[in-house]
Image (spheres, rainbow, N blue to C red):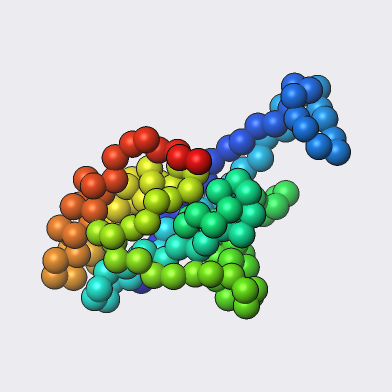
Amino acid sequence: MLVVQAARFFCSGSGSMVGKYSYQYARPSLTVDAVIASTSSPHSLLLIQRKHDPFAGSWALPGGFVDENEPLEAAAARELQEETTVDPGSAAQWYPIGQLPTLAFDHKLIVRTSFRHLAREGAVQQTPGLEEQLAQAADGLEGPWQEQ
């Protein structure tokens, strides 16, 4: 199994936030996503089906918000556990790396970048055909990066 973690920042604030709280200054939030790919054949990517908006019903990488003072690796591991095994109603599924469904958020870009990174890893290069499959799958993932 190969693992790549991605992290990104979100900001909310400047009075435009709808909901219970509104802040004058931006409140940055950090999220993590885990890219889990199998090295056994068929080479696959682990995805979860989102239950809530945004992108309810869409397939996505397991991930979510980082808790305050939580290390990124711990947050990615926690989100992976929460979204794939703790909740018996969660939908997690392995997809062949060359036959991925439409992905939520910017996950297509994250997966493309991760596949290109993984293709250069020593463990991948020792698995016959995986390097080429990852490169081909990455080349097939083109924009737009976010669809709703």
| Image coords of residue 55 (percent x, y) | 55, 48
Q: Is residue 138 left or right of residue 23?
A: left
Q: Residue at x 39, y 51 (%)?
A: 102
**In front here: 126 or 81?**
81
Q: Is residue 135 left or right of residue 89?
A: left
**In front here: 44 or 29?**
44
Residue 117 seen anywhere in this rendered image of the structure: no
User: Is 94 drawn above or below residue 74 in the view shown?
Assistant: below
Q: Is residue 61 left or right of residue 112?
A: right
**In front here: 116 or 74?**
116
Residue furthest out toward the right? 20
| Image coords of residue 116 (percent x, y) | 26, 49
Please count the marks in the image: 0
Q: Is residue 50 left or right of residue 66?
A: left
Q: Residue at x 70, y 31 (%)?
A: 12
User: Is 110 drawn above or below residue 77 in the view shown?
Assistant: above
